[in-house]
Image (cartoon, coloured by chain):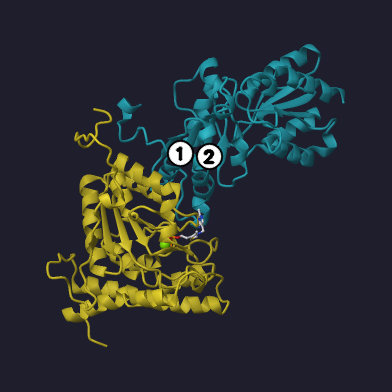
Amino acid sequence: MQEQFGRDRCFNTPLTEQGIAGFANGLASYGMTAVAEIQFADYIFPAFDQIVNESAKFRYRSGNQFDVGGLTFRTPYGGGIAGGHYHSQSPEAYFTQTPGLKVVIPRNPEQAKGLLLAAIRDPNPVIFFEPKRLYRASVGEVPAGDYQIELGKAQVVKQGRDITVLAWGAQMEIVEKACERAEKEGISCEIIDLRTLAPWDVDTVAKSVTKTGRLLINHEAPLTGGFAGEIAATIQQECFLSLESPISRVCGLDTPYPLIHEKEYMPDELKTFEAIKASVAF
Amino acid sequence: MSNAPLTNETVHRVSFLDKASLHIPILRILQADGTTYENAVLPVIDKTLAEKIFDTCVFTRVLDERMLGAQRQGRISFYMTCTGEEASIVGSTAALDKDDVILAQYREHASLRYRGFSTEQFMNQMFSNEKDLGKGRQMPIHYGSRELNYQTISSPLATQIPQATGVAYGMKLQGKRNVAICYFGEGAASEGDFHAGLNMAAVLKAPVIFFCRNNGYAISTPTEEQFAGNGIASRGVGYGMHTIRVDGNDMLAVLAATQQARAHAIEHNAPVLIEAMTYRLGAHSSSDDPSGYRSKEEEAKWQQHDPVKRFKLWMINKGWMQRS
Ligand SMILES: Cc1ncc(C[n+]2csc(CCOP(=O)(O)OP(=O)(O)O)c2C)c(N)n1
Ligand SMILES: [Mg+2]
């Protein structure tokens, strides 16, 4: 990229996340398109103030005189790489509670390209979390041309009748495997990739749950305060009379992300499979 | 070569540097009686500019008095004055081009006035009415004006510092011959964003002027409890940028330093740090009472160094103003 676009446009910075975020805010406020990279989502916290108090509120506080719409943060998140508690966290819910930010998480390379281009061109600041365990593991065709995937739209990746299973990012693979197991036991699963967490696509999820009567949400971040809680609250409001069982959450454990017990921590295929069965048998 | 030191000089016994190792003089051009020092090199200034500077100062004084009064009467919720710091603020803004972007802390409304913000616009903001450019979303004094290239004030301290670096870098990428100027207090300079912003500006070569108003206090915290080093200026040298300390109550010194800082920033695509030594004559804000943390004597001493009076004497000496 540096060769193609020059050192002025593609460059290393000093090691300061708050500086990177502050600089990117300033650059974007001057009308530039800025893509700022934070090496790991675990290290986004020094930049938290610049993102939450500045990026998110730049337009609001100025009465739309200034904005940082051209800004996108890219950062790898999540576990499964034996990285322990400082190379594995999934901090998306800290950001979904901040109006003014969009939060996007792709599930595979083809989705990543379309969503990233949409994020960069979106007239609002976007945090783009990249599932880091897929960097090495994931292989998939990526169309060559320019294409965008609309932000704020979930995708039904598989139709089903008995239960809606919702996830995003690297957990999509996990829930797909769990659903394959369930199918073998005669349970028909509808699988949805949320893709954008803020703003999230209530309609697509509610429509699916109205049809299936059941919802399971899976995320890697710890259960308490995780984004699944928000989805569950909204869906019980939207779909109360259609629900056949309590909304189920299969999430990370409420503990610092472990190193040696990573497998126990993870909301894996089997935990998800068991929860699907329990929901259907309720 | 990577990691090459600036000098290859070596020593063979332990000797430490201390804060006095860096000799930082204070630029002063105007004397108390309104005459200039004999060998002083004056800034570029004519009668029109001097009058504009002076009018801005007078307006700001009156605005500050009246609006503090309005706050006391319960007409507005909050106010902050810049009394005593007018030379730092107006003298620096007067050195800029109108397309240079200002990123201020909050005590720099005199800059906005200098650029033409109308009395009505000030009122619209403070009264959060429907004509407020900020749509009534922020507390009084959090001004912003796209038209006047004055970015909207943000309460969290020092956040505008790395942002100014980003703005200036954008100017460089777009081939503009402009600078960003970033105002902040000596208290805000303790925040991480200060260090991040200055280091990035120096490394990435951004044409930005960092303008520190060292006014002695961060609310009730005096500078002795804020830093132990050689002021804020020493840090600029540490980050590898041109740095100057000026008498912040000396309009001509501030103007001269900022004019040259601007020329340097544009010529070399490089940041400059200016530390203006001044004093916050008023309370921190309408919510503060300084009598709990500083003496009347100290305040009285600084009253003697009124920057607007000093500049007025100079204008009178020049024959640009009648004695009144
Ligand atoms: C991050 C942050 N911490 C604390 C505050 C509260 N606060 C507002 S102004 C101020 C003092 C700042 O002092 P200084 O930077 O010296 O500026 P001055 O008021 O002297 O102009 C403080 C602590 C804040 N606005 N932001
Ligand atoms: Mg101060």
Residue at the image position 44 percent from the left and 36 percent from the top:
A36
Residue A243 x, y percent position in the rendering: 83, 33
Pointer 2 residue Cβ closer than 8 Å to ligand 1: no
User: Label 2 vs label 1: CA separation?
Assistant: 8 Å
Residue that carries the numbered disc 1 in the rendered image: A17
Chain coloured cyan in this rendering: A
Disc 1 packing (10 Å; few <14; some 14–19; many ≥20): many
Q: Secondary structure at mark 1?
A: helix
With respect to residue B79, does B312 lie above or below? below
**Where's residue B261, x and y in %?**
24, 55
Q: Position of residue A184 (x, y in %)?
A: 77, 11
As drawn, the chain in yellow is B
Q: Verify CB contact (< 8 Å) between mark 2 and mark 1.
A: yes
Q: Is residue B159 left or right of residue A224?
A: left
Q: Residues within 10 Å of mark 2 (few under 14, many from 20)?
A: some
Mark 2 or 1, nearer chain start = 1
Of residue A258 and residue B301, the one placed in the foreground of this image is: B301
Residue that lies at the very extreme toward the bottom in this rendered image:
B324
For mark 2, what is the residue? A45
What's the residue type where badge 2 is placed? Phe
Q: Chain of mark 1?
A: A
Of residues B66 and A211, the one nearer the viewer is: B66
Give residue A245's mark: none
